[in-house]
Image (cartoon, rainbow, N blue to C red):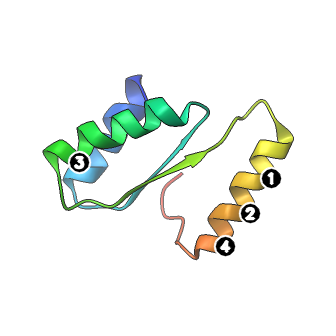
Amino acid sequence: ATSGIGAETARVLAKRGLRIVIPARNVKSASEMKARIQKENPEVEIIVMELDLGSFASIRRFCSAFLSSGLPLNIL
């Protein structure tokens, strides 16, 4: 969700007031995207989580952290 259709999807969902989780390999880019979205929608909750789909270890860490958060998964 740091560029292209993913970024636009995150932006539109945030406009609708939904909580957004941004999984990203580059946490710096994701944090910059979070700031841009929150500039338009300051009340929206955006969570940045590290995820490298090229690494099974990263995928396992992300899944574990996400499940531990207790957040629902409504849209993937």
Q: Residue furthest right?
A: 56
Q: Quadrant of the N terminus?
A: top left
Q: Which residue is mark 4?
A: 68
**Badge 1 local density, few (<14 within 10 Å), some, or many (20+)?**
few
SS of the residue at dot 4? Answer: helix
Q: Which mark is residue 64?
A: 2
Q: Is residue 38 above or below residue 27?
A: below
User: Which amino acid lies under the numbered mark 1 shown in the image of this protein?
Assistant: Arg
CA separation in Å, label 3 and label 1: 28 Å
Q: How busy is the neighbourhood of tag 3: few (under 14 within 10 Å), some, or many (20 plus)?
A: some
Please name the amino acid that badge 3 sits on.
Gln
Contact, mark 2 vs mark 4 (Cβ under 8 Å): yes
Percent x, y of residue 73: 54, 65
Q: Is residue 5 above or below residue 50?
A: above
Name the residue nearer the viewer: 73 or 24.
24
Q: Residue 6 shows which numbered tag?
A: none
State which quadrant residue 63 falls in: bottom right
- Crowd around label 2: few <14 · some 14–19 · many ≥20 (10 Å): few
User: Which of the two labelled residues, at mark 2 and mark 3, occupies the earlier sequence position?
Assistant: 3
Q: Which mark is residue 38?
A: 3
Q: In the picture provided, is 5 more to the left or to the right than 54?
A: left
Q: Residue furthest bottom?
A: 70
For image coordinates 62% across by 44% down, the residue present is 50
Q: Earlier in the sequence, mark 3 or mark 4?
A: 3
Q: Residue furthest front?
A: 28
* Disc on the earlier residue, 3 or 1: 3
Which dot marks residue 60? 1
Residue shown at 67%/69% (left/top)?
67
- Determine the CA span between mark 1 and mark 4: 12 Å
